[in-house]
Image (cartoon, rainbow, N blue to C red):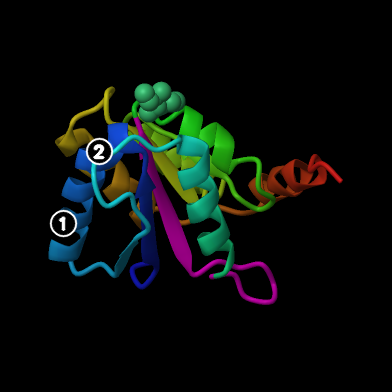
């Protein structure tokens, strides 16, 4: 888990938190890739969600196993998560605290953490990121449920 690279993207509302989290992750020795935006100009969160989701799927191996995680930030973390979840094999979870971030990994095998810059501050956001990155998927009965989610995909 510690070797996974992290892809970051946000909309304008999430820009400052993205920058702060990116710096903190670099300080912690994490490999990050900031997919934008590069400034606070208004951007539509579905565009940024799609950009990150498609980049994340490129990190999958032939068995669909990913070697990276995504971090998406908008005002609430909701819209950008809804958009990212439209792509197959993206499991984006909007989290507000350590518990939701931990369980998003342990039970849902989430590969994208979504945060709301207008909802939580930097410290809570960092705690969420740490919990998300440190928690392995538990598998077992949870894998069966993930498989059922994939079965719900549109044709
Ligand atoms: C942008 O104003 C805001 O709507 C967006 O960041 C997000 O909160 C949507 O879910």
Which corner quadrant of the image does residue 16 belong to?
top left
Residue 24 position in % (x across, y down) = 15, 55
- Residue assigned mark 1: 23
* Residue depicted at 60% across the width and 50% down the height: 90
Residue 135 position in % (x across, y down) = 40, 53
Label 1 Cα neighbours within 10 Å, binned few <14 / some 14-19 / many ≥20: some
Q: Which mark is residue 87?
A: none
Label 2 Cα neighbours within 10 Å, binned few <14 / some 14-19 / many ≥20: many
- Asked if 26 appears above or below 139 in the picture, the reply is below
Which corner quadrant of the image does residue 31 belong to?
bottom left
Q: Which residues are magenta?
A: 59-74
Residue 69 in the figure: left or right of residue 149: left
* Residue depicted at 57% across the width and 69% down the height: 58
**Quarter that holds the N terminus:** bottom left
Residue 25 in the figure: left or right of residue 2: left
Residue at disc 1, secondary structure: helix
Residue 35 position in % (x across, y down) = 37, 58
């Amino acid at each position: 888990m510690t070797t996974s690279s992290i892809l970051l993207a946000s909309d304008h509302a999430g820009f400052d938190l993205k920058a702060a989290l990116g710096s903190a992750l670099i300080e912690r020795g994490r490999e990050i890739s900031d997919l934008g935006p590069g400034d606070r100009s208004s951007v539509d969160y579905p565009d940024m969600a799609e950009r990150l989701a498609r980049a994340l799927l490129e990190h999958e191996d032939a068995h669909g196993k990913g070697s990276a995680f995504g971090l998406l930030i908008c005002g609430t973390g909701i819209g950008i998560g809804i958009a990212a979840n439209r792509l197959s094999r993206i499991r984006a979870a909007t989290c507000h605290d350590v518990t939701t971030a931990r369980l998003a990994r342990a039970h849902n095998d989430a590969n994208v953490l979504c945060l709301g810059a207008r909802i939580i501050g930097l410290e809570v956001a960092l705690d969420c990121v740490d919990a998300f990155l440190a928690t392995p998927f538990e598998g077992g009965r949870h894998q069966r449920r993930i498989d059922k989610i994939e079965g719900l995909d549109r044709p």
